[in-house]
Amino acid sequence: MKKTLQDLLLKIKDENPSLAGLIQDLLEKASIPLQLDITSFRVEDFSRLAELAVRELSEDERRNFYEAFMKGLSSLGSDLPKQLEEKILEKRLPPEKRVHSFEEVVYDVDLKSAVHEASRCLRCKTPRCVEACPLSFPVPSFLSLVAQEKFDLAMKLALRLMPSLRTCGRICVAYCEKACTLGQLSGKPVRIRAIKRAVADRYLKPENLPKPAEEKNIKVAVIGSGPAGLTAAYRLRLLGYPVEVFEAKSVIGGELIRRIPEFRLPSKIVEREVDLVKRLGVRFKTGICVGEDIDLNDLMKQGYAAIFIATGAGVSRSPGIPGLDLDGVEMALTFLEEVKFGKRRSIDGIVWVVGGGNVAVDAARTALRLGAKSVKIMYRRTRSEMPAFHEEVEEALREGVEIEFLTQPVEIIGEGGRVRRVKCIRMKLGEPGPDGRRRPIPIEGSEFEVEADHVIFAIGEEPESGWIKEEYDIELTNRKAIKIDSRFRTSRDGVFAGGDVVRGPSDYALAVADGIKAANEIDRYLKSRNL
């Protein structure tokens, strides 16, 4: 005897009448008949129902709906609940091994599991994942190709947009997953980032690169080779422009290659993606600091019809407290760069890292791997206010990093010119600030001291704009960021900017998106001038 959605509702009604009524309303609005055979209820049907549920139900109601609906389907013989279960398989180093190594923590994502995971996608009529992604990455189309095991086609689709899918699959904050309809219901979104990595690690190869448009006789310069600059150069080259990238450092890749630890993003990943950009014909000039080694005005005179500035936000913010000149006190960005390039191979004793962002967590996990006796993060707010990625904080805790919340340093105390203690004060949270996080307020009389052999500050970064001279006529904001309009144009004609030098410290996805959008705006600008 066949079972229908009406039978499912009756089962739910026995346990929760009001929920059954709510689900019946959703089914009616989705034009799904109650007489539909359970075995004929497909992903496409559930997708319509799911999109309605996300739009109309509260968070608690969504979870209750999903749990009850899947339980009912399963009891009536439907295989849809199993189809929607998370299937991704990530291979990780155990904590006891990883703390003695800079090997990548997640060292592989199983491709077969990625295929099954891609099949979880509901193919929503209005894909929230695409709307949430700063790049507007074509998630449903990509996942559909992966589910069909058309990996080369999936890779070609991604490469039309960006060159760095392997990096994306490791460090992106995954706006798409936060918005995923299935995740909004079940708490377990389609693991889009991991799927990207599984495919890109195996199919990011030269033959999948798109061919550039017919070459134009118009040169474009890009200053900076981080995610914004690299992406802009890639996109401009695809549009047919000869592109030269000026990088102040000796290596290409910006913060990605200089400061993100190997256990999160191996250098070889970035280098491989840079090689693909070079294959398209983008030229790189390293060790050249614009504003010092070459003047911006001279670049314009050399025939570059447009310039894109993407110098990032690599200037560490100072805490402005006594004792910063003591040996053992340093800035996290410098510390991470020294480790990345082999200039720093050990650290001893008690290490305190001050800050709550990704840089602070990276520094703490790095210090642990260099042999520190103990590593603790000091953060002036609570766990829920930490801007660091949740999963990275979890990994740090598993590895043995400790976190002291609602605490702020007020003085570094030394003996014989070297740090020995940190004077701290307890904090409490007040009203929310402009960023939505509650403001930390010092508690009078709560000062105390902790022992320390090293103190590493990671309290934020400022835009890398110190090289911009007044005569360049490029307007800056009061926070030293380059001021642009909605089309990435600076106050100087022909000069565009994007990424962290405009936003301040943000994230990989936003920087890449700026590179894509700025390239399009530069193309529009150059076409409008009929050059």
Image (tube, grey):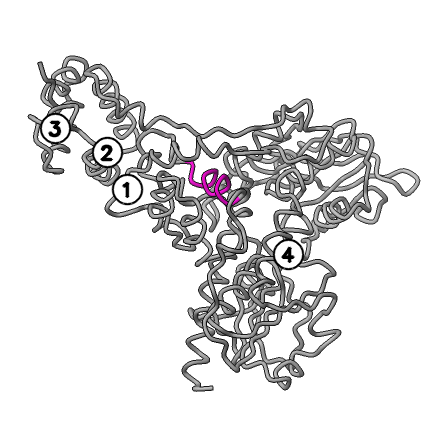
Q: Quadrant of residue 136?
A: bottom left
Find the residue positioned furthest to the front. Answer: 207
Task: Work out whether mark 4 precedes mark 1 in sequence or the reverse, and give the earlier one.
Answer: 1
Mark 3, secondary structure of its residue: helix
Amino acid at pointer 3: Gln
- Determine the residue positioned at 40% across, 40% down: 177
First along the sequence among labels 3 and 4: 3
* Residue for badge 2: 43
* Residue 439 showing in the rendered view: no
Alpha-carbon span between mark 4 and mark 1: 35 Å
Q: Nearer the viewer, residue 316 or 117?
A: 117
Residue at numbered disc 4: 253
- Residue 371 percent across, percent down from the top left: 79, 30
Discs 2, 1 touching: Cβ within 8 Å: yes
Tell which circle, 2 or 1, labels the residue nearer the N-terminal end.
Answer: 2
Pointer 1 and pointer 3: residues touching (CB < 8 Å)? no
Q: CA distance from mark 3 to mark 4?
A: 53 Å
Does residue 28 appear to the left or right of 233 in the view shown? Answer: left
Q: Which mark is residue 24?
A: 3
Callout 4 amino acid: Gly
Give how far across and how far down residue 63 sits, in percent. Answer: 29, 27
Crowding near the residue tagged with mark 1, few <14, some 14–19, many ≥20 C-alpha atoms within 10 Å: some
Pointer 2 local density, CA inside 10 Å: few below 14, some 14–19, many at least 20: many
Query: Sequence order check: which comes first, mark 1 or mark 3?
Result: 3
Residue receiving disc 1 = 123
Badge 3: few (under 14), some or many (20 or more) residues near its Cα, within 10 Å? some
SS at circle 1: loop
Residue 195 drawn in magenta: yes
Q: Which residues are magenta?
A: 191-200
